[in-house]
């Protein structure tokens, strides 16, 4: 299963996408909501599906680092086809993912969104388009929590890492 499918399923279930980094090259990174006005003011490359996949991989690495629990189990990967689900949908560029397909809610809606996204990107041969807002009702209500400042978020994560040692 590709990370694109996981992100699309996350979008359908929660009604939101992963946040967008406004200053990704700096030490303390500030994030904004994907569909916010601030995100639309950023360069288009910050809202691409590739950027969302990178954010998902970064999120999974951080969860493993902070909790010590393997979020996605490791499976033996096939050397030639590490992730072939997008390949079966006609997208032949290399794509990151996991070699097993987990059971997901709203599979049909997820695959419909993935197919429509890939249809838009077919000419470019990469996942280089931003997602469009969807009118689907999320299964889980989206609760907006007050975000910590980047420095306090960094310090809290550092304290958690120290306690784990």
Image: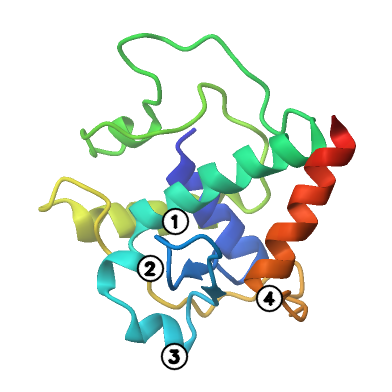
Q: Are marks 1 and 2 in contact (CB under 8 Å)?
A: yes
Neighbour class for label 1 at 10 Å: few (<14), some, many (≥20)? Answer: many
Q: Are marks 3 and 2 in contact (CB under 8 Å)?
A: no
Q: Nearer the viewer, residue 107 or 57?
A: 57
Quick one: label 4 or label 1, which is nearer the N terminus?
1
Q: Secondary structure at mark 1?
A: helix
Residues at marks 3 and 4, CA–CA distance in whole angstroms: 19 Å
Residues at marks 3 and 2, CA–CA distance in whole angstroms: 15 Å
In this view, 86 is above or below 135: above
x, y (%) of residue 144? 74, 80
Residues at marks 4 and 1, CA–CA distance in whole angstroms: 22 Å
Residues at marks 1 and 2, CA–CA distance in whole angstroms: 10 Å
Q: Which residue is mark 1?
A: 52
x, y (%) of residue 130? 33, 67
x, y (%) of residue 61? 61, 38
Neighbour class for label 2 at 10 Å: few (<14), some, many (≥20)? Answer: some
Neighbour class for label 3 at 10 Å: few (<14), some, many (≥20)? Answer: few
Quick one: label 3 or label 4, which is nearer the N terminus?
3
x, y (%) of residue 23? 43, 70
Quick one: label 4 or label 2, which is nearer the N terminus?
2
Q: Which residue is mark 4?
A: 149
Frontmost of labels 3 and 2 is 3
Q: Position of 48 compared to 105: left or right?
A: left
Q: Are marks 3 and 4 in contact (CB under 8 Å)?
A: no
Quick one: label 1 or label 2, which is nearer the N terminus?
1
User: For the point 48% across and 81% down, which residue is it?
Assistant: 35
Q: Which residue is mark 2?
A: 131
Residues at marks 1 and 3, CA–CA distance in whole angstroms: 17 Å
Q: Which residue is mark 3?
A: 37
User: For the point 79% across and 41% down, which residue is it?
Assistant: 161
């Amino acid at each position: 299963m590709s990370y694109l499918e996981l992100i699309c399923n996350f979008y359908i279930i929660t009604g939101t996408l992963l946040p967008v980094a406004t200053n990704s090259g700096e030490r303390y990174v500030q994030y904004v909501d994907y569909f916010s006005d601030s995100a639309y003011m950023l360069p288009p490359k910050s809202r691409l599906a590739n950027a969302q996949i990178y954010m998902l991989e970064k999120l999974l690495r951080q969860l493993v680092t902070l909790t010590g629990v393997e979020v996605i189990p490791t499976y033996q990967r096939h050397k030639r086809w590490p992730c072939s689900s997008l390949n079966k949908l006609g997208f032949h560029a290399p794509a990151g993912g996991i070699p097993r397909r987990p059971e997901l809610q709203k599979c049909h809606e997820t695959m419909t969104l993935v197919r429509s996204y890939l249809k838009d990107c077919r000419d470019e041969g990469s996942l280089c388009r931003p997602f469009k807002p969807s009118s689907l009702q999320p299964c889980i209500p989206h609760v907006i929590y007050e975000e910590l400042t980047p420095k306090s978020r960094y310090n809290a994560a550092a304290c958690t890492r120290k306690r784990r040692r």
